[in-house]
Image (cartoon, grey):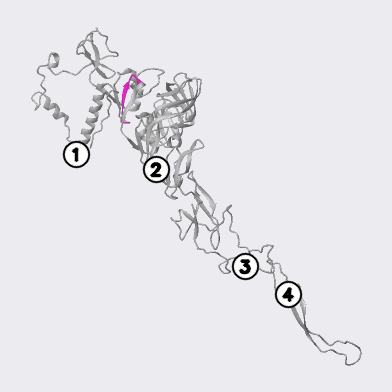
Amino acid sequence: MSQWIPNLTGRVDPVVEREIRRLFEYHYATTARLDNPAKVTSLDLRAVVQAISAGGSSPLNLTGLVGQTAQPQIAKVTHVTSLPPIGSNLAQAGVVVELNGIPYFFDASTLPGTWRILGQVVLTGTHVERVENFLPTSYPTNTLFYETDTEILLLNIADPSILYPAPTVGAGNRWIPILAHPVEDTHIRRGRALIGQGRVDTSGTAVTYASGELFSEDMVGKYITIGPTQYIVATFVDTTHITLTTSAGITFNVAYYFSFHPAIYYPKGTSFYETDRTILYLTRDAEGVVDVTGSTVTWASGLTFNAYWVGTEIQIDDILGNPVRYLVQSVESPTSLTLTQPAGPLAAVGYSVIGGEWLYQSGENYNVLLSIPSDLSLADVGLIFNSTDFSHRHLYTLILGFPGWRFHPGDLEPTAIVAGISLPGGTNLWKLCDGTAVSIATAGGSLATVSTPNLTGDVFILGGSPGAQRIATNPTWDPAAKTEDTSPVGTTAANSSSVVVQSGTGTTVANHPHTHSVSGLTHSHDLTNTNAILNPPSEADGGLPKRIGLQWYMRK
């Protein structure tokens, strides 16, 4: 397996670069041994001491050393509260002193001499211990600190412009995270501090759970924010009770915020994989627009504030649009924080916090519809949720400028109707259009009840407003429809009867057949549904075009 080592040439002191390289090489060597347990051997410290003692198998050879070093001595170094001035008794060639846990030696190779760190020192402790007890101004530039609980390596730098291209208000050394492992944990333990885990009551140092997320044993020794103030968890009593190292006063139903992995702790670009939601996040800059009055900063748009920004730097544009860095003193709420010194008045100016937020990068969450994530923010825009029971894809995106859920483009949304010869995809996905009610999914992850149109039986589908099934009706005649007879002029045949032509007998005339012409026989009748009834088109009575029978289904 290739061994990746960061290239820090030109970015940090060569001594620091060398030691970081050694740390990586040590890590890979240790990993290689652990891959093969047969390579790992136990260490018997008593046997080591016996071996290096006089008469042992490998006694220490101090031949050639001068002074007291030629004989075994008790290790002792003079502790000082500040480096001795040049010319003092301690500022002599080769003298070693200890300041804030770091050994220094006096280098007299060039006059008048100078104090130098004896090797590259890596301080260790928890995150809280570093913040509370290891002020960066008390340690030399390029000192390394390894946080044992977060497994993050930090570098003490005097020039933050390496990361912040803006002038600093309040100069001084800073601990800057430079190296961290990719993180894997649940979304609750990653947490967004602005969302918070719940509410608590406090009485002095005692904290009692009121609602939300219960407490856990591994909160001990870590920061917790109650209201606008950060505290340190001293002890875990049970899932509803913890104690603090300092009093929080008497409060009731106050919001508390806690995260095992605040983004601001990690180097920019660190990845976090949510094992329960199968989603990948990266630490990115938190950016937005704020208003400033004195030292009070009020959120206007963009990413809201995070409770774990206390003590970190925030970059705020001045009236000319030039970025200036300030320190965050406290975070009162997701929309309000306080600086250590005034910056305003300013209106609608940009702000940013380097590596201040976990931003969604990739991955899709799969769960039942009613478990769609509800604790999201602008930092989660782009996240995709797949409902395993309704098989819909939901996209968390901006809707009219605000983040929210909608159906993913291309998803066949509920109430869509299709025709088929059988039920497609199962009863969880489709409902026969028979006029009955059905529960359908909504974009936001809830359920809604609608009635399907009744498309059973011999029905046709028309364009227009949806409605109930209409009954078949009889066709009607056009008002101009008539019957018409155009036969030629008719004739009638008749025999003349005997008629008297003169008085007396013998005055009759014989019958004589003849024809009378009758004109005006052409005529018509109006056609109406009364005298010429038409049946509705149907399978039985005809009148239908070519057709095929299918069943209609509505998407849930």
In what element is the residue under mark 2? Answer: strand
- Residue type, mark 2 in image: Glu
According to the picture, the residue beneath numbered tag 4 turns out to be 489
Q: Earlier in the sequence, mark 2 or mark 4?
A: 2
- Residue type, mark 1 in image: Pro
According to the picture, the residue beneath numbered tag 3 turns out to be 535
Question: What's the mark number on residue 253?
Answer: none
Q: Earlier in the sequence, mark 2 or mark 1?
A: 1
The image quadrant where one finds the N terminus is top left
Q: Quadrant of residue 436?
A: bottom right
Marks 2 and 1, how far apart at CA: 38 Å
Question: What's the mark number on residue 364?
Answer: 2
Marks 2 and 4, how far apart at CA: 90 Å
In what element is the residue under mark 1? Answer: helix
Q: Earlier in the sequence, mark 1 or mark 3?
A: 1
Q: Quadrant of residue 114?
A: top left
Q: Residues within 10 Å of mark 1 (few under 14, many from 20)?
A: few
Relative depth, front residue between 83 and 107: 107
Across and down, in percent, residue 362 comes to 38, 39
According to the picture, the residue beneath numbered tag 1 turns out to be 37
In what element is the residue under mark 4? Answer: loop
Marks 1 and 3, how far apart at CA: 92 Å
Across and down, in percent, residue 419 comes to 49, 57
Q: Look at the image and give the residue range highlighted in magenta.
A: 150-160
Q: Nearer the viewer, mark 1 or mark 4?
A: 4
Looking at the image, do the residues carrying marks 2 and 3 touch, with CB atoms under 8 Å apart?
no
